Image (spheres, grey):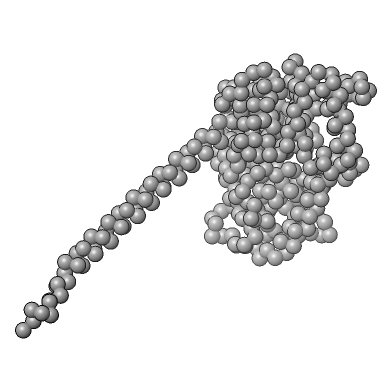
Amino acid sequence: MNTNQHTPVSSSATVANNYLARSLHQLQSTTFLHCMEHSRKTINTSPPVYTGMTALRLAGIETPLCSRFEAMKFQVLYIGEPTKRSGRKDTSYLKCPPSLTGIAHLTWTHDNITIVYTHPLMTWALLAPYLTQIEVIVLADAILRASSGSMTVANISRFLDGADAFPGRRKCIDALVFLDAVTDSTMECRCTLVMLRHGLPQPVKHWKILIPELAHEATVDIAYPKQRVIIEYDGDAHRRDKRQYRWDERKRQALRAMGYTVIVVFADDILTSQGRRRFAQRVAKALDTTCRNRPHPKFRALLADDRAETARQRQRRYRARERRKGAAYESGIAEDDSERASALIPPASDPATRT
């Protein structure tokens, strides 16, 4: 098994002042301790290779939205037939496609205990079949962000070129066009994708603007500089850090005084279908354009999730119809059987006619 030594997430002063990085660092350490305990209880001769959400947490990478793995604490890689792996209630198993077997794993050693987990790009490929197209893009963005510049879109493209075929490869290829600039968080990435999904122009990420009132060059999350529209996402860090909250408010007031339209986005605006629609309409109104139901042809991959949901609804309706037909058929058979049984029973004689 090929492995590379793990480098933990930095715990410098920069991380201490960054809510997201601090949360990821804490989750990374907690996951490592859980994996140590989990590996001790493993009966296999070789140590488990962690993958999926477990591998992402070990690598200090934000995890995508995926209900399939919410109830499972660990995801473990296996090669070969399912019957050759042991089952555990808290563990789900992901099979490694043949095209990905040659990729080196990462290791993290502490107190003479070594934890092995899959490379982030391999983890991305393994999760792709279980993620929506949106979340495949979000995860690729998170992997690039966590690499701090050591990984590029070109690296991802070469990785896909070297992997002949695996489930979800099409989703991964379609994600590349959306990775022109890395965002600061998964929610900021989703904000951008919501706007593109509704046919809005491609925005500028991490736009810098000089604010004379504050004598400061600020960086905004998402912007349309020509239209003087700025979009900012407010997450937990903005509410928990009072200094950050005050600074954000001063910055936004100053930007509005400069003639910019500042739209503040919250989680509900992104994680619900109604919220996404309202958010896109707000941006479209600020841009003085139309909120469409189709993206630009360049970003047509964003329609994949809607098509998949339409197919699922069609399948559910079909199954419901078949169940109703089956129930009606069974009910008809039961009635026919009852009638036949009644015909076989001789009528009871009238006591008055008996001799």
Q: Is residue 93 above or below residue 296?
A: below
Residue 209 visible here: no
* Residue 339 horizontal/vertical position (percent): 21, 63
The residue closer to the viewer here, 120 or 255, is 255
**Residue at screen point 64% across, 18% down:** 289
* Residue 118 horizontal/vertical position (percent): 69, 47
Residue pushed farthest top? 226
Which quarter of the figure has residue 183?
Answer: top right
**Residue at screen point 38% across, 51% down:** 323
Residue 267 visible here: yes
The residue closer to the viewer here, 321 or 27, is 321
- Tell me if 224 is positioned left or right of 271 in this view: right
* Residue 7 horizontal/vertical position (percent): 81, 45
The residue closer to the viewer here, 276 or 285, is 285
- Tell me if 206 is positioned left or right of 296 in this view: right
**Residue at screen point 68% across, 26% down:** 282
**Residue at screen point 44% across, 40% down:** 314
Q: Is residue 39 above or below residue 51?
A: below
Which quarter of the figure has residue 114?
Answer: bottom right
The residue closer to the viewer here, 299 or 110, is 299
- Count of marks placed on residues: 0
Residue pushed farthest bottom? 355
Q: In this view, does 22 lie above or below 109?
A: above
Residue pushed farthest front? 352
* Residue 149 horizontal/vertical position (percent): 79, 33
Residue pushed farthest left? 355
User: Quarter holding the C terminus?
Assistant: bottom left
